[in-house]
Image (cartoon, rainbow, N blue to C red):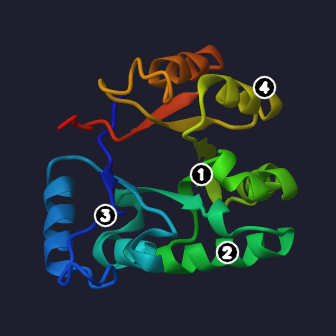
Amino acid sequence: MVELGLGMMRLPLLDENDFKSIDYEQVNKMVDSYMESGFNFFDTAYVYHEGVGEEAFRKSVVERYPRDSFMLSTKLPLFVITKESQLEPLFVEQLKNCGVDYFDYYLLHNVSGYTETAWKNVDLYSFIQRKKEEGYIKHIGLSTHGDAEFLEGILVEHPEIEFVLLQINYIDWEDEAIESKKCWEVARKYNKEIMIMEPYKADF
């Protein structure tokens, strides 16, 4: 099944110099048009719009539509994690930000060299697996900008991961640095569901 998701991470602003000044009139129109077209998958993240991106999702979707009418994906912000004690408060904060009592899809955000401090020093995988067992997450996964070899290492070590979010588009398909095609093949090799980011990347 192919699902066209609506990203809630780079939203229209009232003031281009203030990333918190979200234009809710425009966002609400976007959400309504998307839902009226028969789609219902929303993707957000903790770090966007200087920390109010998830709140924007709550205001434009959760406060205007019943919970069983949409699916939600968000991400654990590895960029700010250095110790185990941060995980539970962050997760609780995200549930509150989004205004929900469970996430349909929950990701480790950008597992790569950039977030190495978090995934090497903190047991993130056990944490999200436990939250799934407790009913707060339906499906656990990760996003990465790492290469195919890096991705395969993760999937071998953590078979509990159900899906991956990958940068896939025509421009990056054969790119030797991004390895979109190779990463896709690795994910399929391990029978993981694939979500796609930056599908309409353009080369100007």
At horizontal 33% and vertical 55% (from top left) the residue drawn is 7
Callout 2 touching callout 4 (CB < 8 Å)? no
Which mark sits nearer the N-terminus, 3 or 2? Answer: 3
Pointer 3: what residue?
Answer: 10
Q: Name the mark on residue 156.
A: 4
Q: Is residue 15 above or below residue 117?
A: below
Q: CA distance from mark 3 to mark 1?
A: 18 Å
Q: Is residue 115 above or below residue 22?
A: above
Callout 3 touching callout 4 (CB < 8 Å)? no
As helix, strand or loop, the secondary structure at mark 1 comes to strand
Classed neighbour count for the residue bearing mark 2: other residues with Cα under 10 Å, few (<14), some (14–19), many (≥20):
some
Pointer 1: what residue?
Answer: 107
Classed neighbour count for the residue bearing mark 3: other residues with Cα under 10 Å, few (<14), some (14–19), many (≥20):
few
Nearest to the observer: residue 171 or residue 134? 171
Q: Name the mark on residue 90.
A: 2
At horizontal 75% and vertical 28% (from top left) the residue drawn is 153
Q: Is residue 179 above or below residue 97?
A: above
As helix, strand or loop, the secondary structure at mark 2 comes to helix
